[in-house]
Amino acid sequence: MNNANFILLVCRKFSGEASNAELQELDLFLSTHPEFLQQYKLLSQHWEQHENPNQVFVEEALQKTLHQLHLPVNNIYKTPVKNKNRSIFLSAMAVAASAAVIVVMALFFTKQSKKAVPPVPLATLEKKQNSKGIKSTIQLADGSKVWLNADSKIQYPPTFDGNTREIYLDGEAFFEVAKNPKKPFIIHLANGTVRVLGTSFNIRAYNNEKVVETSVATGKVAFIPKYKNEAKKQDTLFITPNNKVSYIYNVEKIKVAPTVAKDDIAWTEGKLIFKAMSLLDIATELERNFGKKVVFTDDAAKQYIFTGSFKNNTLEEVMYYLSKTKGFYYKITNTELMIAANAAAL
């Protein structure tokens, strides 16, 4: 067992993710290699001392630890360790703890693959594309299940060969990924990548929207934003249940915040949930869900704010209740939904 494997095993123990076999392996290793006990104690000490979520330790702190562990900086990967209310982030630049960010580099992605597997040629992929107003479910070859939202497209291979499972998404989808520790599940987006081993989560990544969102229902998900500046250091955000990462890719800004996962995936059950949303943003959702083009005849109604929930309602029902909450007018034709602040504009 080398230093990197030893530290990874210790981190898995601290995070509560180590299996019984791994715990036994660690105990046996420490009992037969007492020279590693000092390293173990130092890592344990960092775990205890870095509990304060508001404390930030910069490069000097990490450098000191690396010297104590006799480890070169270049051999350390970003490795987060999370246990209840604490997080440790080991990186080549800093050691930090942050309660607002439950994040950064999943344990199962700290090692690079020994052999790079070339991506599946796009020409050989199956494609499923939903038009506006249409939703569907897809069963993948590995047993994973995908709920594909309206106005969304997914591409996937008929079988998952090699040591990864890779697909491509434009739009919104909810995934229940079959567990396979030997084959990470990778979703390629126009402005990022999501990697998992086995979990359930929602991705909203429409190419014509400025924000990519990933929220987790169960398990853990790693989100890797795609930066325009290729020289910029790559980040990996590690997301746990009922948390959401939002990446505003035009300004390369990332935010991680608590969420209600069941609300994020409510669309799979025919629900529409609006939380302090403008009528302009609601119109985008209505257009996707009901397939009718939304036209505002004036700008006044666009900024009306609504909070509400609908389940399996018709467009007529949704618009009726919204219009009763705020004073605006609407007209539904075979192809359009027209909205105005006053009746004369329709």
Image (cartoon, rainbow, N blue to C red):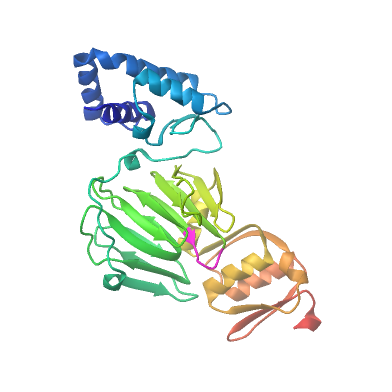
Residue 202 x, y percent position in the rendering: 45, 55
| Extreme-bottom residue of the structure | 334
Labels in figure, total:
0
| Residue span colored magenta | 204-209
Residue 164 x, y percent position in the rendering: 26, 54
Is residue 231 highlighted in magenta?
A: no
Residue located at (54% from left, 57% from top)? 249
In this picture, is 216 found above or below 166? above
In this picture, is 171 found above or below 261? below
Q: Is residue 202 visible?
A: yes
Residue 345 appears in which quarter of the rendering?
bottom right
Residue situated in front as seen by the camera: 321 or 21 = 21
In this picture, is 333 found above or below 82? below
Residue 28 appears in which quarter of the rendering?
top left
Instruction: Describe residue 123's horizontal placement relative to residue 303 as left or right.
Output: left
Residue 218 x, y percent position in the rendering: 40, 46
Instruction: Describe residue 272's horizontal placement relative to residue 144 as left or right.
Output: right
Classified by dominant secondary structure, the portion drawn in magenta counts as loop
Residue 251 x, y percent position in the rendering: 59, 55
Instruction: Describe residue 188's horizontal placement relative to residue 284 as left or right.
Output: left
Is residue 208 highlighted in magenta?
A: yes
Instruction: Describe residue 100's horizontal placement relative to residue 220 as left or right.
Output: right
Residue located at (35% from left, 20% from top)? 69
In this picture, is 188 found above or below 57? below
Residue located at (57% from left, 68% from top)? 285
Q: Quarter holding the C terminus?
A: bottom right
Q: Quarter holding the N terminus?
A: top left
Q: Is residue 47 visible?
A: no
